[in-house]
Amino acid sequence: MRASSERGIALFMTFLLLLIFAGLAAAIGIFAHNSQATGKAALLDQQAYYIAEAGWQRARQALVAGTWTAAASPGNSYTESFGTGEYAVTIVDNGGSSYTITSSGYVGNATTYAARRQVVEDALSVTSSNGTNYSLTATATASSTNGSNTASKAKDGNTGTKWEAGTNGNGQWLKMDHGSATTLDKIVVLEDDRINGVTIERSSDNSSWTTASGLSVTESPSKTWTCTFTEASYRYWRATFTASGSSRKVAVQEMQDYNNTLSSLGTGEVSTTW
């Protein structure tokens, strides 16, 4: 009787141990599954962050190069897909050379995604400066000249001298011959408060002239005319002027020919939304 009781206890203990081991195995399985799921989610999160960071860096590079408008106008979103991911980037011009970059990264795309993350850089400062002034080594000629105020004085690097037209009114021009095809994307005219408008033309042969493509002309500050246009390579570049009055002679202190305006970036406030 005693031996039978002992066998019963042994069987019970064996069964209990089996239950414990089965429970432990189930718990380990659940833990492993949850850990795997958590690890996979963390990996997807990290991938989405890297994608968002790639878009952010692209936007910074575009601001330095001045090529952002080739992808999208400031304030609009630019989207680029690669591999299994996609980023959507927006640059907002805050004014005063300050920008905000928002880059959203997706594993998948903006509509269907396994993970998404966002990188924001606020109050990013962009400082621009001109590149080389090619007018300094060019040969200047003009439509007409008044006395000793010759065309060469509009490219001598001295704002204390000037070229002055010998004829009143509109249509007077100042031309730079660079000797060979020279790539420009901006011309700055510093004048004597006698100009109401500027047109930029270019030529390869000094005979056939075309207006610079994408030409945008602004006067800021007063008496400084900044003419930007699509980068192009020509030997001859000419500025033609609208006078501020029919009885006035146009006068230019400096005509400056530039290519590749240089920009430098500061560091804004960077934040990440997970």
Image (cartoon, rainbow, N blue to C red):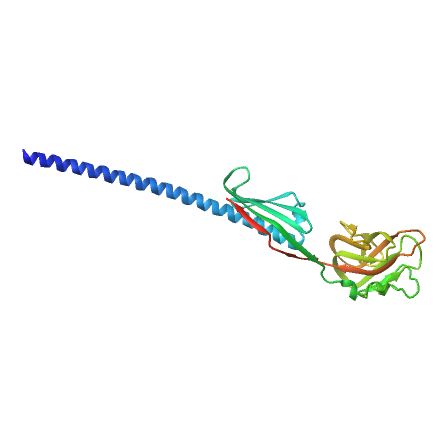
Please give the count of numbered marks on the rendered protein: 0
> Which residue reaches farthest left?
1
Q: Give the residue drawn at x 78%, y 60%.
A: 256
Q: Give the residue drawn at x 24%, y 40%.
A: 21
Q: In this view, does 148 lie above or below 55?
A: below
Which residue occupies the foreground of this view, 16 or 141? 16
Where residue 89 sits in the image (x, y, percent)? Answer: 60, 45
Which residue occupies the foreground of this view, 270 or 178? 270
Where residue 6 sits in the image (x, y, percent)? Answer: 9, 37
Where residue 61 sits in the image (x, y, percent)? Answer: 62, 54
Q: In the rendered view, does 68 fall on the left or right side of 86?
A: right
Q: Is residue 265 above or below residue 108?
A: below
Q: In the rendered view, does 30 fall on the left or right side of 70?
A: left
Where residue 263 sits in the image (x, y, percent)? Answer: 67, 57
The N terminus appears in which quarter of the rendering? top left
Q: In the rendered view, does 107 fall on the left or right side of 5?
A: right
Q: In the rendered view, does 17 fall on the left or right side of 55?
A: left
